[in-house]
Image: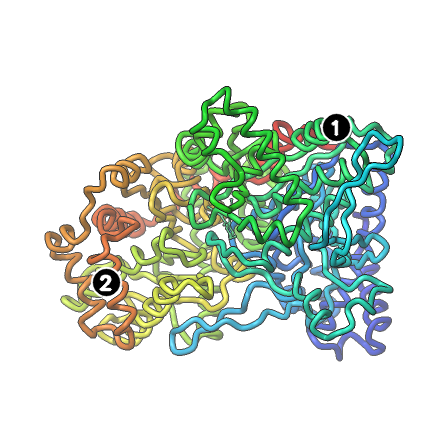
């Protein structure tokens, strides 16, 4: 984008005065940010209009990515970067006496997602635009995002996240694109004289207005600006009389009021299914409206539209598309079914049984009577067709409706043409185990798409020092073609490059140390080893295994304050679902241990623990560039992919990992020598579950080192955790340790002490870090997205 610093300064001053009627110097950071955001939005608006017009003119096939969650992070700098004006604006702001980074921090980080799934959706939106694909996002504009986490006396407290309190400069409300979503009502069928077709009458419905708010998704230096559409629930215009009581009006607003804070654990709540239908229906309606403008035959629908559903949350898009094609557009069942299957594809993100969505049949029948009929019919036809081929038993196991419940994964698989997992191991487990019945029926539907991340946000924006160092060492090609970062391998034995890398890491650690001091009052040594575990708190992710290792070090130092141990800073970031009691107990435990150890002078700063409050995208951008070790220690077979593993690797952290999710592929790329692998393998875990011989009590009895650590939980050493310590001890020792922490403990310790040794050899460590950065290119979400586009959506990048 052609733009010069002088011009920018003039425009910025003008914009500020226009908005606030005084000079920018006197403005608050928020006002300064709003003026800049507004200006930036104006700068891409022409490309935005242009991109949409081009797609329409060429009748280009478009993908619609349906996701209940998006976690975009702050958008100011990523928009500037992708528009190619980041440096220019930085300099301009500087000359105006403003610090761009400080102004950028005034943006509220929209937390419209829980964790991995939502962040993946946002990396994908960036990559779709940046690879020049015609793509759109479809989701919910939650009035309140994921709760804000506070620690009070070490306990997690949840506060509402009012992310819209200041203006959201990026969104554009599109009232004229609003649609009606209907709930409840009565369904009947009529046949007019001379009409061969039954007409569906759906009356007495509760009608909700879905209003879209559009946000631009700016591509990287390519002029493409795609659209992310988030829907908000409102009372239909002119229908105010029907919503006359406060109660009725509240009910409407409630639909898009707040994001469910559960990650990998579903609750069969009415409001949740209302949210799911609301944004699925609104999205489908707007797609159908668009397709009709093209004036093409309905059979061409799958040639113009691909609909992707991010996990099962938007699965109702399948019966909704069927409904519209049949009831409103007059297609036959068979025509509608062909179109639907060819259009929809589905990604599975978890094998955890408790995360599998199932809705009570009666709930769907009452809330969505017509959709319920269509699901019943899909199910009936499925069983009728498959029973003669595969027999009663297998067919029944794949039924959509069973025991009064509707299984959303089954509907998603049957109603789509593609089912993918998110890492090689994960997809293998789906095919061989979790979804094996379906794999037998539809082997051609199954495929793998290993997750990826965008290095634009996770390296270029989060780690400016590394970016500069890479540009200087290997040129800038890696920025548009991430694989090219492999050139860095040529410098693996270049002492000068290794030293520079160490400097980059050190300065990032200093930046984090300043945060820890200013925000939390914790003093940490930037030369210590920074050991990072950042992800949702969940038993299967095994933050507790990390804790056991910390306690091992603690005991060694208590025994011998002069023990020759590598100085470490353990950094945690994790939110627990508000209803997940055990996860909250683990938070309290970690905070209590942090308090104990951080304030124990005999530990002599050899261990520090920093548990940051309110972990999210913005804190990740601060922590990841400062990490030395990346903790990816889930029980093998449980973590579908993980994506923080890729972000940390790209920033030169060394992975400490079980062979789970994408860790397996990270090892393959980086090589055995540049990663620490330990623990049970996925098939060994399977074997234990099957033959049931695991006995954690036995390990406790026979392993004195581990026994001493575990006893710390119940002997009063850690103040304030009488209940938590006891419950956690019991889960590990008395209730047989569901996630095999005790079994993996020895291997984990050994890997940790190997890491100590490696870290003390500075050249060796820096070389490992370099090899990780140099091997991270293949994990770019640009490549992931191009594979989705080529193999599933059948769309091509525009040139
Ligand atoms: C309805 C409750 C619920 C909410 C969210 C169930 C399941 C989910 C998600 C599927 C959980 C999730 O975020 N899964 C993560 O997806 C990432 C992106 O593919 C993977 O990297 C993580 O391994 C996986 O846990």
- Left or right: residue 16 versus residue 723 is right
Residue receiving disc 2: 729
Q: Residue extending furthest front?
A: 193
Helix, strand or loop status at disc 1: helix
Between residue 630 and residue 764, name the one nearer to us. 630
Would you identify the image quadrant in which residue 406 lies? top right
Would you identify the image quadrant in which residue 87 lies? bottom right
Between residue 514 and residue 226, name the one nearer to us. 226
Spatial CA distance of label 2 from label 1 is 57 Å
Task: Report x, y in % for residue 268.
Answer: 52, 55
Disc 2 crowd, CA 10 A, few/some/many (<14, 14-19, 20+): some
Would you identify the image quadrant in which residue 327 lies? top right
Q: Residue at x 78, y 45 (%)?
A: 201
- From where the camera sits, is residue 223 visible? no
The residue carrying mark 1 has its beta carbon less than 8 Å from ligand 1: no
Look at the picture and state if 124 lies above or below 710.
above
Residue receiving disc 1: 303
- Left or right: residue 530 versus residue 35 is left
Task: Report x, y in % for residue 452.
Answer: 54, 41
- Left or right: residue 258 versus residue 657 is right
Between residue 776 and residue 363, name the one nearer to us. 363
Labels 2 and 1: the sequence-earlier one: 1
Point out the image quarter for the C terminus.
Answer: top right
């Amino acid at each position: 984008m052609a733009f010069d610093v002088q011009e920018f300064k003039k425009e910025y001053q003008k914009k500020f005065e226009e908005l606030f009627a005084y000079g920018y110097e006197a403005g608050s950071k928020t006002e300064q940010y709003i003026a800049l955001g507004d200006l930036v939005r104006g700068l891409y608006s022409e490309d935005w209009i242009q991109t949409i017009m081009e797609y329409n003119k060429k009748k280009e096939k478009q993908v619609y990515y349906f996701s209940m969650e998006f976690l975009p992070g702050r958008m100011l700098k990523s928009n500037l970067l992708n528009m190619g004006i980041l440096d220019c604006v930085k300099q301009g702001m500087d000359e105006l006496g403003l610090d761009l980074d400080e102004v950028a921090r005034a943006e509220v980080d929209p937390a419209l997602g829980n964790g991995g799934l939502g962040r993946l959706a946002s990396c994908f939106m960036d990559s779709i635009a940046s690879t020049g694909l015609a793509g759109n996002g479809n989701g919910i504009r939650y009035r309140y995002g994921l709760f804000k986490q506070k620690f009070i006396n070490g306990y997690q407290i949840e506060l509402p996240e009012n992310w819209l309190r200041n203006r959201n400069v990026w969104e554009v409300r599109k009232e004229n694109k609003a649609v009606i979503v209907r709930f409840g009502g009565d369904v009947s069928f009529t046949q007019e004289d001379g009409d061969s077709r039954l007409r569906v009458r759906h009356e007495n419905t509760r009608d909700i207005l879905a209003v879209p708010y559009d946000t631009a998704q700016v591509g990287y230096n390519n002029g493409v600006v795609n659209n992310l559409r988030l829907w908000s629930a409102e009372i239909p215009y002119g229908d105010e009389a029907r919503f006359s009581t406060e109660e009725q009006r509240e009910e409407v607003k409630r639909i898009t009021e707040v994001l469910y804070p559960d990650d990998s654990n579903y609750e069969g709540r009415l409001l949740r299914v209302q949210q799911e239908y609301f944004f699925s229906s609104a999205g489908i309606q707007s797609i159908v409206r668009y397709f009709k403008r093209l004036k093409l035959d309905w059979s061409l629908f799958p040639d113009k539209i691909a609909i992707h559903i991010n996990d099962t949350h938007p699965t109702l898009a399948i019966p909704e598309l069927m409904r519209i094609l049949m009831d409103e557009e007059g297609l036959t069942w068979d025509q509608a079914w062909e179109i639907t299957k060819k259009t929809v594809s589905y990604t599975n993100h978890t094998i955890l049984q408790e995360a599998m969505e199932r809705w009570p049949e009666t709930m769907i029948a009452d809330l969505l009577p017509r959709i319920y009929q269509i699901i019943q019919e899909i199910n009936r036809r499925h069983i009728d067709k498959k029973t003669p081929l595969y027999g009663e038993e297998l067919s029944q196991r794949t039924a959509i409706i069973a025991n009064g419940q509707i299984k959303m994964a089954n509907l998603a698989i049957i109603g789509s043409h593609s089912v993918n997992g998110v890492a090689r191991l994960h997809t293998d487990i789906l095919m061989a185990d979790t979804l094996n019945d379906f794999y037998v029926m539809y082997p051609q539907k199954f495929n793998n798409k290993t997750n990826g991340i965008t290095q634009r946000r996770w390296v270029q924006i989060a780690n400016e020092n590394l970016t500069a160092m890479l540009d200087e060492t290997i040129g800038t090609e890696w920025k548009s073609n991430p694989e090219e970062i492999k050139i860095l391998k040529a410098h693996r034995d270049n002492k000068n490059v290794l030293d520079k890398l160490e400097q980059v890491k050190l300065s990032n650690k200093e930046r984090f140390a300043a945060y820890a001091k200013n925000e939390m009052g914790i003093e940490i040594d930037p030369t210590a080893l920074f050991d990072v575990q950042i992800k949702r708190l969940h038993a299967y992710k095994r933050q507790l295994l990390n804790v056991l290792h910390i306690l091992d070090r603690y005991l060694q130092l208590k025994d011998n304050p002069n023990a020759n141990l590598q100085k470490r800073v353990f950094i945690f970031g994790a939110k627990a679902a508000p209803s997940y009691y055990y996860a909250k107990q683990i938070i309290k435990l970690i905070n209590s241990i942090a308090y104990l150890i951080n304030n124990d002078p005999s530990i002599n700063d050899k261990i520090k623990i920093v548990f940051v409050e309110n972990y999210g995208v913005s804190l990740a951008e601060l922590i990841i560039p400062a990490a030395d070790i990346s903790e990816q220690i889930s029980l093998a077979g449980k973590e579908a992919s993980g994506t923080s593993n890729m972000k940390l690797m790209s920033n030169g952290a060394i992975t400490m990992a079980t062979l789970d999710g994408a860790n397996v592929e990270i090892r393959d790329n980086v090589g055995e020598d540049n990663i620490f692998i330990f623990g049970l393998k996925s098939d060994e875990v399977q074997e234990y579950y099957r033959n049931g011989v695991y006995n954690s009590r036995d390990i406790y009895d026979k392993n004195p080192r581990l026994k001493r650590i575990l006893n710390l939980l119940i002997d009063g050493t850690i103040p304030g955790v009488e209940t938590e310590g006891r419950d956690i001890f019991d889960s590990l020792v008395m209730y047989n340790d569901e996630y095999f922490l005790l079994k993996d403990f020895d291997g984990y310790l050994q890997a940790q002490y190997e890491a100590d040794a490696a870290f003390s050899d500075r050249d060796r460590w820096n070389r490992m870090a370099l090899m990780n950065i140099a091997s991270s290119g293949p994990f770019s979400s640009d490549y992931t997205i191009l594979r989705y586009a080529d193999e599933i959506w059948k769309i091509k990048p525009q040139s």
